Amino acid sequence: MIEQTTKDASTFVSQVDGAFVFIFGISILFLVGITAFMVYYILKYRKSKNAEATHIEGSNTLEIIWTVIPTILVLSMFYYGWSGWKSQTEIPDDAIPIKTIARMWSFTFQYENGLITDTLYVPKDQAVKLDLVALDVLHSLYIPAFRVKQDMVPGKKTDIWFESEKEGEYEIFCAEYCGLRHSYMTSTVKVIPLIDFEKMTQIDSTALVNNNTVVDARQAGISVTRKYGCNACHTADGSKLVGPSYKNILGRSRVVIQDDEEIEVIADEDYIRRSIYEPNIEVVKGYEKGLMLSYKDQVTEEEFMQLMDYFKYLSGQ
């Protein structure tokens, strides 16, 4: 269940909210004060009471007052903002690193033991550093409850950190428009006790480990699709998303667009390999070109074979 209250969700909450309340309070104070001042003098010096304009000399005292006071207030607001920004850039040395990967249109999280999840798990009362990697276009990781947000630029190393003080589940959003399914690019951060987090990250529980007798080939294939965010664009039940469904994919003919010409191909192992490594060479008719990037340097041969086993299962083979 997603938490509705964010008090103590992270150590940044009180600081960020305090700065917001301070700046908002000053803005309201000036809005009310200036409006009341303006209305008062409009009524006091209206034409019916002052038929002839009165010449008023300038006042050095007033000039100093309305220069010095706003300057002090602006510097105060700057200090609140700067101190909050500075604390969010000073990452503790003992922060737990978690690699965060963004691609159209999903987030995945990789821990030090190799575990990869599509939900972010973090321990309570422990600093966590997210190493942010964007594989395709500009994304932005935003956790409103923690008051943290950071753009993810392809080819540029960025990171953020936080420390949560309250167990629970909180929403993650992509806050930068990144394509057709940008609004679906969401995830969840789960804050759990430190002992549970240590148990989870001390063992390698991925489905991609050699000699893992607990996990069968189908589950391994599912893990591959989750690892690379395939499920953001493809389905396993035959329904249409950004790309074709995995269901009944193997052994069937399909019409593709190649060099602006329609040709018919059989979806065999070679076709699947081309679709993953060179996705824009043959685009299935009815789908857009250029929406999928090449995974040639990412999907290993072992992972590809696990995908094939999964696709065989979905194709009834």
Image: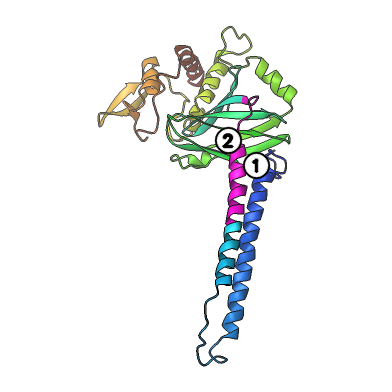
Q: Position of residue 45 (x, y in %)?
A: 57, 85
Seen at 73% across and 34% down, the residue is 167
Q: Is residue 172 above or below residue 221?
A: below
**Of the image marks 1 and 2, the number of the one nearer the N terminus:** 2
Quadrant into which the N terminus falls: top right
Give amino acid for label 1: Ala
Secondary structure that dominates the magenta span: helix
Q: Is residue 143 visible?
A: no
* Position of residue 96 in the picture relative to residue 266 (left or right): right
Give coordinates of residue 115: x percent, y percent.
60, 19
Tell me the SS state at disc 1.
helix
Rendered view: 200 above or below 234: above
The residue pinned by badge 1 equals 145
Which segment did they paint magenta?
74-96
Place of residue 299 in the rendered image (x, y in percent of width and height, measured from the top left)? 45, 18
Is residue 41 rendered magenta in the image? no
**Outermost residue, front side:** 60
> Splitting the image into 4 quarters, where does residue 253 fall?
top left
Instruction: Evaluate whether residue 46 shows in this view.
Output: yes
- Give the residue type at disc 2: Thr
| Image x and y of residue 117, in percent | 59, 25
Residue at figure coordinates x 61%, y 75% from the top left: 37
